[in-house]
Amino acid sequence: MRWLLVIGFVSGMLFVISPHFSDVQQFCEEERIAIHLARGEGYLSPFDLSANAPPTSWCPPVYPIFVAAVYRLSGIRSDTSLMVLLVAQVLLRAAAAGALFQLGSRLFSRTAGVLAACLFLLHPLFLRALGFYWDNYLALSVFLWLLAWSIHLGERKRTLAQACNFGFALGILALTNTAYVLTFPVLALLAGGWIAVPRRGDAIDTRADAGAGCRAGFVFVCVAALATIATLEPWTIRNYLTFGEIFFVRANLNTELLIGNGPESAGWMTFATIDLHPSRNRLEQEWLLRRGEIGYFADCGRRFDAEYRAAPSAFWSRCRNRVVYAFLGDPASAVREPFMLHWIWHGMVIDRLMLNALLAMFGIAGAWAAWRMGQRAGMILLLLACLSVAPYVFTQMYDRYTLPLTALLLLPASYLITAVGKRWAEGRWPDQDVAVRAIAASA
């Protein structure tokens, strides 16, 4: 495990100092909120950097607070601060690779765990993501380690303290990136033992009494849920006192729906689709600051409703496109991935499309193969992968939004590759004996 973390950190730093690395210079709401915090002005709007900016609920608070702490110690946007943030990204990438190794080793085999971690470290998307100064790597690392922890908790007798800690961790993830919220029920059911994930080599118990311990699991899930609510409560109270409304972490869903579903959108985030965003559109920005966030979000909701009523089929067509984009990306995107040749044919970047298609195919096939071999872990990983990006299906899809899905697909894909290798070398599938014992147990 330690060697993997070292390799992840060293490889990340080598990439950062290579000519292939470039900062993704975008308007970053989290970073601009952090500037207000570092100045001691409060949690204020990213669309106005003056000390008189209005309060905001645009972003979850964890990452802006982290960036603000760095800025406070090392200077706002100083070379030292930017280097600290970049090193933090590299460390979080290494931590995510470590979590994939743990999950692959626990669920499938040590070889599958090593392969998943190595593919993660080599994947061009995760290298390019180092240049995004957003919460993506922080949230991804927390999510993957929470998944590993939930599986670990589901195997043993759990305490109320563990339930509280688990719920607190879920709350921190929600306050880092709210898009993961749909995975919370699955994580909680795994930790509570309601969804059993046998260790590799163990048979799946299909007897009628296999649900023993459900009462303890129910208590664990309830306590964890209460701990999550308690973690979210201070931020919720702050938002209610500031804006007079209760909402889940952030209130700008209507704006995301409007921006991602304009007539010019096919479902993928492009410069054309975000021209309506307050970060790029001066009129929208002025209107937001004049109306206040809650009023502006309500206006966006009315505008989206009007556009939806005018063409409901167009909205659902974009949602269908976004499901495909989540797995394949936008083949027409002009963004260059590190170390890729960028072959263009009829407007499509063929090498990137082939990479994404192969991972999607191997990931889905690996999840099915694991299920057929008596290991339900593959399907659970596929479910979590889909849930992690599901909210974006209704707004707009983008590369950095697909990081958790891509990372989780690497696990069943690695299982499939190692299983085929074992079949080729030894003449049998790795978990064939598990499937036989599972059938015997159910007889």
Image (tube, rainbow, N blue to C red):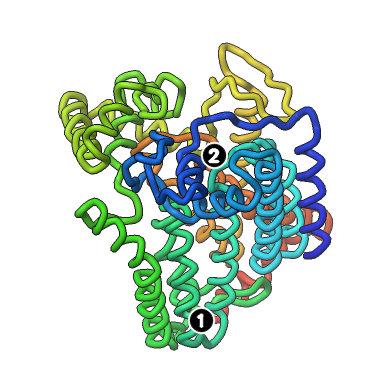
Residue at 46%, 83% in the rendered image: 210
Q: Spatial distance from mark 2 to mark 1, Cα to Cα?
A: 32 Å
324 shown above or below 266: below
Q: Residues within 10 Å of mark 1 (few under 14, many from 20)?
A: some
Q: Nearer the viewer, residue 298 or 153?
A: 298
Residue 364, visible in the rendered structure: no
Residue at 59%, 67% in the rendered image: 148
- Looking at the picture, how far across and down is residue 149, in whole percent? 57, 71
| 370 horizontally vs 97: left or right | left
**Quadrant of the drawing holding the N terminus:** bottom right
Badge 2 marks a residue whose secondary structure is helix
- Looking at the picture, how far across and down is residue 255, in whole percent? 30, 36
Residue at 58%, 45% in the rendered image: 406
Residue at 54%, 59% in the rendered image: 143
Quadrant position of residue 182: bottom left
Badge 1 marks a residue whose secondary structure is helix
Q: Which mark is residue 43?
A: none
Residue 39, visible in the rendered structure: yes
63 shown above or below 359: below
- Looking at the picture, how far across and down is residue 313, in whole percent? 24, 28
| 145 horizontally vs 421: left or right | left
Query: Tag 1: residue type?
Result: Gln
76 shown above or below 382: above
Q: Nearer the viewer, residue 326 or 403?
A: 403
| 387 horizontally vs 407: left or right | left
Q: Nearer the viewer, residue 87 or 117?
A: 87
- Looking at the picture, how far across and down is residue 265, in whole percent? 37, 23
The residue lying furthest to the top in this view is 346
Q: Which residue is mark 1?
A: 162
Q: Which mark is residue 400?
A: 2
